[in-house]
Image: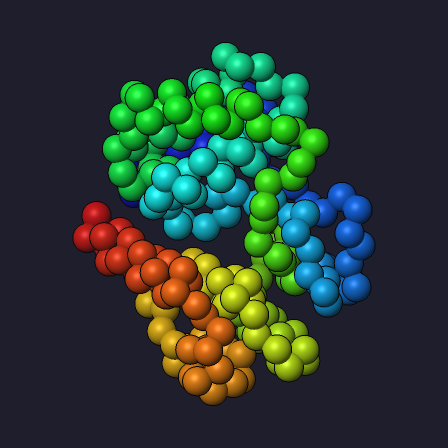
């Protein structure tokens, strides 16, 4: 399946997106909000076409769903986990064995709901109802990051996701262009994990084009 089937999440009123609850934005716009120092409180699962490619990422996604839905019981969580782990539903790129699934369900269900799962820092959050094109979003990201004079891994990751949403191959030169910085700056800040993520997103884009 080239698309992600979120119908079962929506029909069962499973929360998988949440805006910051105690961090307050420095700028408010029709299209979204800006946090100069960033916020870790924005959970926004499945907002791009990028799929879950590793066990670590899969566990994190399920942890976030468990955290955002504290009233969910064990049976409901197992139902959600099984649907997300089913490769046919378009969430994961790999086959999850029954034993691995049981291990994940057990590990996540033991998680302390009082402690938020580790999350990427976000400086710019676009509203779901935002009518901007991916190109316009990327222009805003580059413009605001240019004002801060710094480019972090989280900033680069946001730009990578927008490029992927545009169905555009991610390159160092494109990232440097939108941040109005040198390619050397991107190389210095991107890190090995994001380099791997860049390759995975580009590979997935090629596979989607074949479908």
Q: Where does the image place residue 161, in percent across and percent down from the top left? A: 46, 59
Task: Indicate whether 185 appears above or below 194.
Answer: below
Q: Residue at x 38, y 20 (%)?
A: 102
For this rendering, which residue is in front, 114 or 145?
114
**Res 31 seen here:** no
Q: Residue at x 44, y 85 (%)?
A: 184
Q: Is residue 196 left or right of residue 147?
A: left
Q: Where does the image place residue 202, in percent across and percent down from the top left? A: 30, 61
Task: Indicate whether 38 appears above or below 40.
Answer: below
Q: Residue at x 76, y 43 (%)?
A: 21
Q: Where does the image place residue 204, in percent across and percent down from the top left? A: 29, 53
Q: Quadrant of residue 168?
A: bottom left
Q: Quadrant of the N terminus?
A: top left
Q: How many marks?
A: 0
For this rendering, which residue is in front, 125 or 95?
95
**Res 201 seen here:** yes
Q: Residue furthest bottom?
A: 182
Q: Where does the image place residue 66, in percent across and percent down from the top left? A: 57, 28
Task: Indicate whether 133 appears above or below 104.
Answer: below
Q: Residue furthest top?
A: 75
* Coloration mode: rainbow
Q: Residue at x 52, y 66 (%)?
A: 153
Q: Quadrant of residue 131?
A: bottom right
């Amino acid at each position: 399946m080239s698309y992600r089937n979120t119908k079962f999440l929506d029909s069962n009123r499973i929360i998988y997106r949440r805006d910051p609850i105690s961090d307050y934005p420095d700028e408010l716009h029709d299209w979204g909000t800006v946090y100069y120092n960033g916020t870790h409180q924005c959970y926004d699962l499945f907002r791009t076409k990028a799929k879950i490619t590793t066990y670590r990422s899969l566990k994190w996604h399920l942890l976030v769903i468990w955290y955002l839905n504290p009233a969910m019981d064990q049976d409901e969580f197992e139902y959600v986990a099984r649907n997300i782990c089913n490769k046919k539903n378009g969430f994961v790129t790999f086959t999850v064995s029954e034993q691995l699934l049981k291990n994940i369900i057990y590990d996540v269900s033991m998680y302390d709901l009082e402690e938020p799962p580790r999350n990427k820092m976000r400086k710019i959050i676009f509203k779901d109802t935002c009518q901007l094109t991916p190109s316009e979003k990327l222009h805003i990201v580059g413009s605001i990051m240019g004002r801060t004079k710094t480019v972090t891994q989280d900033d680069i990751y946001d730009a990578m996701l927008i490029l992927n949403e545009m169905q555009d191959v991610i390159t160092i030169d494109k990232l440097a262009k939108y941040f109005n910085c040198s390619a050397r700056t991107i190389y210095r800040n991107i890190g090995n994990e994001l380099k791997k993520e860049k390759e995975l997103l580009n590979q997935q884009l090629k596979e989607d084009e074949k479908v």
